[in-house]
Image (cartoon, rainbow, N blue to C red):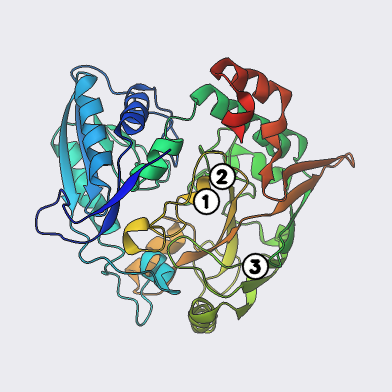
Amino acid sequence: MAMYKETRDYWSAGIGFELNVFEDLDALSRAADVLVTRPGIPRSFVPAGFGVKPGERVLLGVNSFYDSELVKALVKAIVKAGATVDVVCTDMGSERELREDDEYFGFIYNWKGYPNENEIRNWSARRDWIERRAEDGGYDLLIHGTGQPPIERPYRSDTLPWTSAEAFAHSAAFPRDVWDAIERSSWDLIWNKGRGGRVRITDPEGTDFSYTLFEEYYDPNYYKDSGFLPMFGEKTLLAHLLATPTPPYMPDKLDCEGIIAGSTCHFSCPYPTVSAHIEGGKLVRVDGGGKYGDVWREMLEGTKDIHYPGHPGPGLFYHWEAAIGTNPKMIRPSNAFMLSGCGTTFERLRSGIIHMGIGSAPRSKSELWAAENGLPYGHLHIHLLHCTMKIKAKDGKEYTVIDNGHLTSLDDPAVIAIAEKHGDAGALLK
């Protein structure tokens, strides 16, 4: 059983606060050894492995909220693999409880009351700086951040989406071949069987949302020279299966309709259930949600007349993301609703959870334009924790991708057969 203790002896000098420190160091060390040496893959929001080789130079970027034992375990594993490692730590300041509207500090830019430089964005603000250090320093691998779009760099780059040693030890070493099989099984329903079909997503909190998987979005040339990252494609983003095509939009085929409802997002504490009403792919009304919903309603009104490049009409809030998590062992850390715990950011990667994104797509031409002109941009999230996702294909057959929060690919005999190579398949896939 995992063991924890309270401590103020943090590894970053001058920063004192209470946090959970993992005591099952053997489990932590084993997970670090696996992740560090296992081959990585491109286009991943969560690392399948870092693929560290002897003689390589690694730059590890963390912040002062990472569990100290996790950082130590990674450094030890990198050195054990025959590489050298430099660690850069960003000071995140004081610990505190998360608030209902903290998502805005992390994901919304140029909006009144939420400065672009803030305590939540201390880390992401260092992204460009550390990427320059990695390039100028001639590093072979940069490990930094909790998620990244598929951008080419002159060095290998991967993320560390675990600030908690507790969550890391539980999920980071999940067998790569099993994970690949899970993703292939789920993606087959969307990319092959579902092409041209109609999707419906429901959830007990009030979600009832549907859209068509138009075949035009499956053409890789559709995204060429569009100014938008090609995130919807035959090759998936690990632990981030995009169940809906991403921008650019086809204005004549924006048929996303319904309600998206939930009480968690990425970086806030839970809030009263918020309901986002979507018509023709566009957000038209926000109900409930406490402080989270209050600010969203203000933003919806304040951006309604702005026409962002690449958006089919005026307004910031268009639905562009429905991403499925695929790792059955990803968990919510016990300090999740403290600033150090990053809210429910990481559990969005857990198998069967869908996180919805509404707003502007990251690093798109719409965001670059808004930044240049000092206008609001960004996107907000709603997590669906117990959703059901079904696809009615063109031939009339119905496929269930998620059943009440359970990713059906975990029941695929082909997945189970691969899991059995690692021992108790039932326990591994639970």
Q: In front here: 193 or 425?
A: 425
Instruction: Give how far apart the Cα atoms at labels 1 and 3 are.
Output: 15 Å
Q: In front here: 402 or 68?
A: 68
Residue drawn 45% across and 74% down?
A: 100
Residue 235 in the image, given as x and y percentages of width and height: 55, 32
- Amino acid type for the residue under numbered disc 2: Gly
Residue drawn 61% across and 73% down?
A: 273
Residue drawn 24% across and 19% down?
A: 81
Q: Earlier in the sequence, mark 1 or mark 3?
A: 3
Which label was assigned to residue 127?
none
Q: Are marks 2 and 1 in contact (CB under 8 Å)?
A: yes
Quadrant of residue 384 in the image?
bottom right
Q: Residues within 10 Å of mark 2 (few under 14, many from 20)?
A: many
Q: Which structural element holds mark 2? A: loop
User: Circle 3 is placed at which residue position?
Assistant: 261
- Amino acid type for the residue under numbered disc 1: Arg
User: Circle 2 is placed at which residue position?
Assistant: 325
Q: Which structural element holds mark 1? A: helix
Q: Earlier in the sequence, mark 3 or mark 2?
A: 3
Quadrant of residue 321 in the image?
bottom right
User: Circle 1 is placed at which residue position?
Assistant: 348
Residue 311 higher or lower than 168, as above or below? below
Residue 161 visible, this angle: no
Instruction: Give how far apart the Cα atoms at labels 3 and 2 are.
Output: 18 Å
